[in-house]
Amino acid sequence: MKILILGGDGFIGSHLRDELSKDECNEIIVVDKNTLRYKEPIENCYTYLLDLMEETDWYNFKEIFDYYQPDFVFNCIAVANPDFYIKEPVLTFEIDFSLNKKIIDFLVTRSTPFLHFSTSEVYGKIQTTEKYHEKTSNLILGPSHKLRWIYATSKILLEQLILSYIIKYNIEACIVRPFNFIGYDIDWIPSLDMCENEWKPRVYSCFMDNLLKNEYLQIVNPGTQQRCYCDIDDAIKGLIAIMNNWDKCKNRIINIGNPNNETTIIDLAKLMIKKYNELTINEFNKGMILVNSELFYGSEYEDSERRMPSINLIKRLTGWEPKIDLENMIEKSIKKTLEWIKNW
Ligand code: UGA
């Protein structure tokens, strides 16, 4: 199969690339504006460094697309860091909505089936049911002046556009809502100067940064907010299961996550401290401090209190279920972060 991964150097895209290229029958075409996670050349993988926001690169992308004529597309292009939404709301909209709309409009002209990434963040701020269901849960965001929600708003608008295109143009697409995937390489670690971002990474990388510097882990108020973390290896299997069961999965919205791995952010911090101290000789002897969200992110920040997915739909359609529990996921991720730092 010829599979195009847009954003194939990002966290999810690069794991998809590594997994899909293990099958020698696949040809993988990667398009990304970065090569941060590029390791060594893979024989059946062709990488193109293109920034699709740039007109010339967009033109080249269309040529490359028509040259390969992929059978399937994973569209992973997105920014997914809450601190970025607040510091760069316009760019968040331009990437998460405008650029993605341009990509989808193009895919429609080529009638190529695609998997599009939405986000668990569309479910919003307050969980009113025990688990979020794709077809029945309401999407409850905060007030407009809280710019954190520009990301979710962009994603919701695009979801509705894709669903409208499915009816109008008879295309094949699947929208996935990922729930907090975690892996050692989810984001950059600021103290290692891996890149010059002026915004903060997501919580795993923030806490890793604190641990490595032996400084207090900063818990954003109130600390009792909850997330369900899903190991990236489990998540990748779920995404590939959707592609492999396309006739059942196409034209739907599907949650991917691990409802068994729910934790508060305080408990996540405690677990990371415990695992870090078990895995390294550089003892971490500080602790945690509670910080005000306005000081940490700015006044436009608001948080989701809780996000727990129902995964009945993906289980029924593909048989997929996540296997890796929270403790193993954190241990595995910290181990890999430490190994990676050693070889860096
Ligand atoms: C983010 C994105 O907005 C989602 O779209 C994305 O799908 C999701 O991550 C994901 O990884 O799947 P969120 O879970 O809020 O959502 O992102 P984090 O930045 O990882 O924050 C998680 C929680 O940790 C928040 O309550 C945040 O306030 C807290 N936090 C973060 C801390 O307490 N300390 C830190 O140093 C960083």
Image: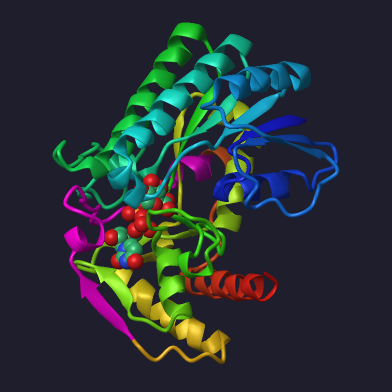
Question: Is 288 one of the magenta-colored residues?
Answer: yes
In this view, 304 is above or below 287: above
Residue 150: where, in percent of width, then height? 28, 36
Q: Is residue 112 left or right of residue 309?
A: right
Question: Is 218 one of the magenta-colored residues?
Answer: no
Place residue 16 in its image quadrant.
top right
Residue 90: where, in percent of width, then height? 32, 33
Q: In this view, does 330 lie to the left or right of 140?
A: right
In this view, 274 is above or below 317: below
> In this view of the protein, which residue sits in the foreground, 41 or 109?
41
Place residue 221 in its image quadrant.
bottom left
Please state the extent of the stretch shown in magenta in the rendering: 287-316
Q: Which residue is drawn at 19% across and 47% down?
A: 300
In the image, ligand 1 is in what quadrant? Answer: bottom left
Q: Residue at x 52, y 45 (%)?
A: 315
Q: Residue 120: in sight, yes or no? A: yes
